[in-house]
Amino acid sequence: MASLPDLTIPEDGKLAANITYFACALRAAGIPVGAGRLIDAIRAVEAVGFSGRRDFYWTLHTCFVSRPEQRVVFGQVFRLFWRDPQFLEHMMGMLRPTLRGTNEPRKKKAAERRAAEALLDGANRALPNVPEDGEEIEFEATISISSAEKLKQQDFEQMSAEELAKARRAITQITLPIKPIASRRSQPASTGPLPDWHATLRAVMRTGGELQSIKRRKRKQHYPNLVALCDISGSMSGYSRMLLHFLHAASNAKGAGWAKVHSFTFGTRLTNITRHLHQRDVDTALHAAGLQAQDWEGGTRIGESLHAFNRDWSRRTLGQGAVVLLITDGLDRDDAALLAKEAERLRLSCRRLIWLNPLLRWEGFTPKAAGIKALLPHVDTFIASHNISSLEALAKILGQAGNSGDKARLMGLL
């Protein structure tokens, strides 16, 4: 925590109310704060007291922070909420574009923008008109329902900043469930479909040669890996950031069933960002991934990137029936023959290859580009990835057992 001037406490202050508002800001910024923690915080401040900002900071930190990844968010919200001397400058600098001069711009810390958005949520909204006594109020129920549906259908590139924030929150609620895969190995089971003759003979020997029952076995089950290859070139920049939020949610989802989630980015080269996306805080994770991937909004070399993945990472990540998500528009600068060769090798190494392409948002889409023609014969499923509904459709597709209909549709595009 940065050293700041001590707080001046008024005689007739409303500290409990301010702590309540502070808890609401923490909750809006992503820290799960409930009524129990709020009551504990108020009682702790009342019991411990404080003589300066540092004591007050650590008292609230003890009550509200339960995970290491929440410390950064808590620190930023605390600094902005409790009267930072540069409060207005930081808030306006983060939430509106500014003209950059010759001075070096201040580097934003992780979770700083999220903290500012949480504090300013609804600050510029106009107050609703209050009806007079006796005036009838008519509600249009379809408006509230259609607003959420409209957000799901809206293109990521056409969303405002507020709509993008809502979309990111909606994306975190999408799960990618997967059914377990039956292994070749088996294990003992009381009602299994397979007879276990070795166990049966051992039981007969223990009973003096009398056969009492036939022992059974069943197939073992295991969950596959999820491998995502995300294009971050210039033509995909409007979608890759939202899809990385989606991959971060998939990497940290509990109970989805995946053994491991591996994430890679590629533009002109391949970058492994798996360990960054496994960080719980999304701002910290994407900031670290952005620092490692140096080819943001550059050119596209899909063939070379797939070659690097097949050579260096396929044996480590594609074992035991992995599912691969290839996120790209297919507009490649490389040789189409190289792309087709590497795509075929990738398909033979995984259990299922799903291509997410934002170009499918156009109704009259036809595979005219050479890169798209090279990729299509080797993918199992070809879906859009330009809005929330397309990501929800991906979750349904992963839960399906077969994909023969997708292959037939792909053959029709060629």
Image (spheres, grey):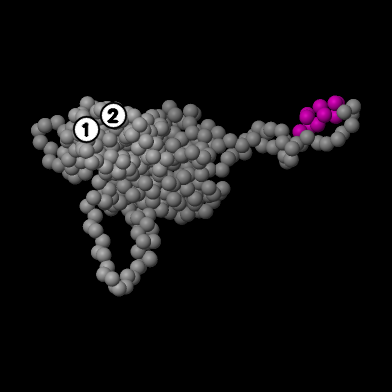
Q: Residue at x 33, y 41 (%)?
A: 23
Secondary structure under the numbered disc 1 in the rendered image: loop
Q: Position of residue 252 (x, y in %)?
A: 44, 37
Q: Residue at x 53, y 47 (%)?
A: 399
Q: Residue at x 24, y 37 (%)?
A: 82
87 on left or right of 391:
left
Report if residue 203 lies within the magenta region.
yes
Which circle's residue, 1 or 2, is located before the other in the chain?
1
Amino acid identity at mark 1: Leu
Q: Which residue is mark 1?
A: 7
312 on left or right of 135:
right
Q: What residue span does the magenta drawing correspond to?
A: 196-206
Quadrant placement of the N terminus: top left
Local crowd size for mark 1, using a 10 Å CA cut-off: few (<14), some (14–19), many (≥20): some
Q: Are marks 1 and 2 in contact (CB under 8 Å)?
A: yes
Amino acid identity at mark 2: Phe
Most foreground residue, 332 or 313: 313
Q: Position of residue 411 (x, y in %)?
A: 47, 52
Q: Residue at x 35, y 59 (%)?
A: 147
Q: Which residue is mark 2?
A: 50
Most foreground residue, 81 or 382: 81
